[in-house]
Amino acid sequence: MSNLAILVSIYLLCFPVVSNAQDKPKNASIRFDKVSGHIVISSDAFRNVKNASNLTLIEKSRSLEVRLVGTKDGPSVLGKKILDKTANTIEFKPRFSFHPGSELSVQFDAKVGGRIELERISIPKRSLPSTSVVQVYPTRSVLPENLLKLYVHFSAPMQRGQVYDHVKIVEIKSGRTIELPFLELEQELWSRDGKRLTLLFDPGRIKRGLKPREEMGPIFKVGNDYKFIISKDWADANGTSLRESFEKKMTIGPNDASTPALKDWKIVVPKSETLDPLIINFDQTLDSSIAKRSIQVFKSDQRLEFKKVALIQNELGLRLLPDAFWKNGKYEIRIASDLEDLCGNRIGRLFDVDLKNPQGTDVAPARKIEFVIK
């Protein structure tokens, strides 16, 4: 929505109905509050308003609406109306903040004589450092042919929408852009803070026997080199383009048809009365996001909190730094059943199942690994 003008259509029956579209309410004051991010409408007429939701007056009722520009009657923007009779104001609080750099056109619908513009407001851009790509997971450069997803971490919140216009996969040798490699979801997969994006490769081109794979072929070919590219034209939540474009080179290895094997994990146990980290070395590279939340440590059924949990060795391990000294006793590492590797394979269940030979398809319960601190 960068540089998209936002039309704020305000239906206020707190003002007298006018017969001439050129007449404007004399006592209306409208502004954008930089601190709250709300649209504030002031008028002495609000003394008579009973309810901010439908602006109920003694004689009649009208409503306050916010609409997106694009069509004559664009879709309404969701938001909340807040009435303050003491200050004689009504604030419109949008559910999602207006993008900096956008222009607001505040209009009054007189019902008789049509709409008239009261005021135009520009949302100022904040003076902030340019946003950049901090990291893309998986971090390793050699990746399996059936890679399922990428995680993109940004230094600041990004604008949502039109994600797939700014990312692409290019085969290095031929320079060919891979057609539709990602599963293009209408509801993009963002973290709550807008700093992490999950990109799913099209499962229809990963799983064997599905029509997209048969018609378009697999996304990657074993032995070939590719680049994952993020365009610098992508704007952050402040409406500013990325500091620079980003590229990640990838060499494609064989298909990964194995599930995580806990028996091959190696645990580096810390000593008692120290703040040494607990280190868990995996048998293979795991999903960076799921690993950090699905692996937990318990003592006497009490989950431990850690000062820092970090992935190590290209997601081949986890380093957990305690916030208190280790004590003697038995501990459990509990692994949730949703733990995945880079290809969506879970413990006891493959993502790409051969229906003619359905081995390794059982859904495993949560698992435990015990260790003792002395």
Image: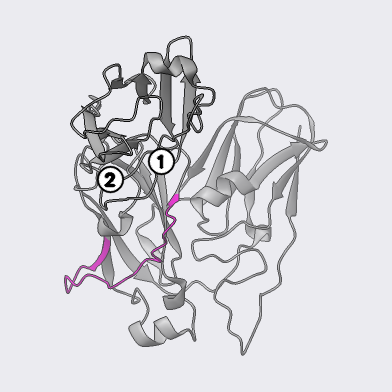
| Of pointers 1 and 2, the one earlier in the residue sequence | 2
- What's drawn in magenta, residue-wise? 168-189
Residue at 48% of width from left, 9% of height from top? Answer: 86
**Observer able to see residue 131:** yes
The mark found on residue 194 in the picture is: 1
Q: Residue 209 versus residue 309: which sits nearer the camera? A: 209
Distance, label 1 to label 2, CA atoms, is: 15 Å
Q: What number of labels is visible?
A: 2
For residue 344, above or below residue 163: below
- Considering the numbered disc 2 on the image, is that residue within a helix, a strand or a loop? loop
For residue 267, above or below residue 252: above
Q: Position of residue 268 (x, y in %)?
A: 63, 42
Could you tell me the amino acid type at mark 1? Gly
Residue 363 is a magenta residue: no
**Observer able to see residue 102:** no
Closer to the eye: label 1 or 2: 2
Residue at 42% of width from left, 77% of height from top? Answer: 205
Quadrant including the N terminus: top left
